[in-house]
Amino acid sequence: YCNRGNALRLQGRPEQALESYDRAVALDPALADAFYNRGGVLEEMQLWDDAVASYENAIALRPIFPQALNNLGNSLFNLARYEEALDKFNRALALAPPNADVLTNRGNVLREMRQFTAALSDHNAALALNPSNVECFNNRGSVFREIGRLDEALADYHHALALNPDHIGARANLALTE
């Protein structure tokens, strides 16, 4: 049922995917991957509280699961539970080698917590690992904008758009900054 859920998710059928993951965990309540994948579908459906519960189940079953910690952090971020999200990103980074996505996500939380120096540090580290990370350029640009470093913000938005001309967030941020 877990593989069926994955196939349905790829087909853009989240409700049916969720039913398959639910069936998988009903048959095997110790299946961490089913809870993890279930959380991903719930995130896509923007059912953040339910996603949090699924990721927490996955982590309870597999405590060394940095991907689940990262995604749990994202769901908590979307619920504006920033301290908890920061904890999850810190735990994910402690369990695995530095990861550009986790560093970017932690940078976003730090920006929301108004810890701009730490946010910039994480975005810089993420870009050192993945210099084509469009989201990170856009997000670092937002930090620069918030601290009044507008030239650097504009440069990051332009860089993001050079990598992906259709990036809506970078276009919007560029318009706000110009």
Image (tube, helix red, strand yellow):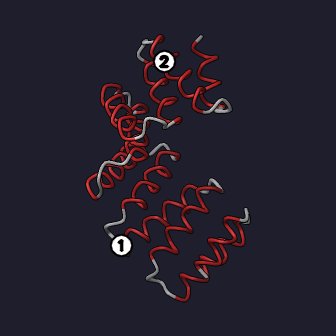
Whole-percent x, y for residue 73 in the image: 43, 51
- 2 vs 1, front mark: 2
- Please provide percent x and percent y for residue 98: 31, 48
Against 121, residue 84 (above or below) is below
Amino acid type, label 1: Arg
User: Which structural element holds mark 1?
Assistant: loop
Residue highlighted by disc 2: 153
Numbered mark located on residue 115 in the image = none
At x 64% / y 33%, what residue is drawn? 167
Q: Quadrant of the N terminus?
A: bottom right
SS category of the residue bearing label 2:
helix
Q: Is residue 55 left or right of residue 158?
A: left
Q: Residue furthest bottom?
A: 27
Could you classify mark 1 by the number of other residues whose Cα lies within 10 Å: few (under 14), some (14-19), or many (20 or more)?
Answer: some
Residue at image point 68% right, 32% down? 166
- 8 left or right, relative to 53: right
Residue 107, located in which quarter of the rendered image?
top left
**Relative to residue 176, is residue 108 depicted above or below?**
below
79 or 153, nearer to the observer: 153
Q: CA distance from mark 2 to mark 1?
A: 40 Å
Q: Is residue 174 left or right of residue 92?
A: right
- The type of residue carrying mark 2 is Ala
Residue tagged by mark 1? 62
Percent position of residue 121, x then y: 31, 31
Quadrant in the picture for the C terminus: top right
Confirm or deny contact between disc 2 and disc 1 (CB under 8 A).
Answer: no
Taking the spot 66% from the left edge, 31% from the top edge, the residue there is 168
Q: Earlier in the sequence, mark 2 or mark 1?
A: 1
Q: Is residue 6 above or below residue 70?
A: below
